[in-house]
């Protein structure tokens, strides 16, 4: 919560400074619309390209790879065994 809280305060502070300097900023709904339409796709495509590069490097190295996890990243209520 601390990180989110400080992040929100930082955004409010930046918006106040921009407003004081009479710099126009997009409305929140316009920002989220553009974010969903453009930014998410770019990030997703970049991540897929990075994954493909990593897999290629691992395959080309000839060494094995073991991937495991302990499911600690699951949120309560989102696990199949609940």
Image (spheres, rainbow, N blue to C red):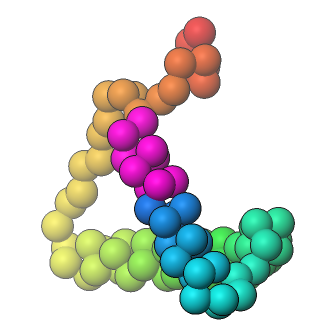
Does the segment drawn in magenta span residue 4? yes
Q: Which residues are magenta?
A: 1-9
| Residue drawn at point x = 63 percent, y = 79 percent | 19
Q: Quadrant of residue 1?
A: top left
Q: Is 15 situated left or right of 52 in this image?
A: right
| Residue drawn at point x = 66 percent, y = 72 percent | 40
Q: Is 33 situated left or right of 59 in this image?
A: right
Q: Nearer the viewer, residue 62 or 1?
A: 1
Q: Nearer the viewer, residue 13 or 46?
A: 13
| Residue 82, above or below 46 | above
| Residue drawn at point x = 61 percent, y = 17 percent | 77
| Residue 35, above or below 69 | below
Q: Is 24 situated left or right of 80 in this image?
A: right
Count the numbered circles shown. 0
Quadrant that contains the C terminus? top right
| Residue drawn at point x = 19 percent, y = 78 percent | 61
Whether residue 36 can be seen here:
no
Does the segment drawn in magenta span residue 77? no
Q: Nearer the viewer, residue 18 or 37?
A: 18
| Residue 81, above or below 73 | above
Query: In the image, residue 51 lies at what x, y percent?
Result: 43, 72
Residue found at the very far top of the displayed protein:
82
Query: In the image, residue 20 lies at what x, y percent?
Result: 59, 81
Whether residue 30 can be seen here:
yes
């Amino acid at each position: 919560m601390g990180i989110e809280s400080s992040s929100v305060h930082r955004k409010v502070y930046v918006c106040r400074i921009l407003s004081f300097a009479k710099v126009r900023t997009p409305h929140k709904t316009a920002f989220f619309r553009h974010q969903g339409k453009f930014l998410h796709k770019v990030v997703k495509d970049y991540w897929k390209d990075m994954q493909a590069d990593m897999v290629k490097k691992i395959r080309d190295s000839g060494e094995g790879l073991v991937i495991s996890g302990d499911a600690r990243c699951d949120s309560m209520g989102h696990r199949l065994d609940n």
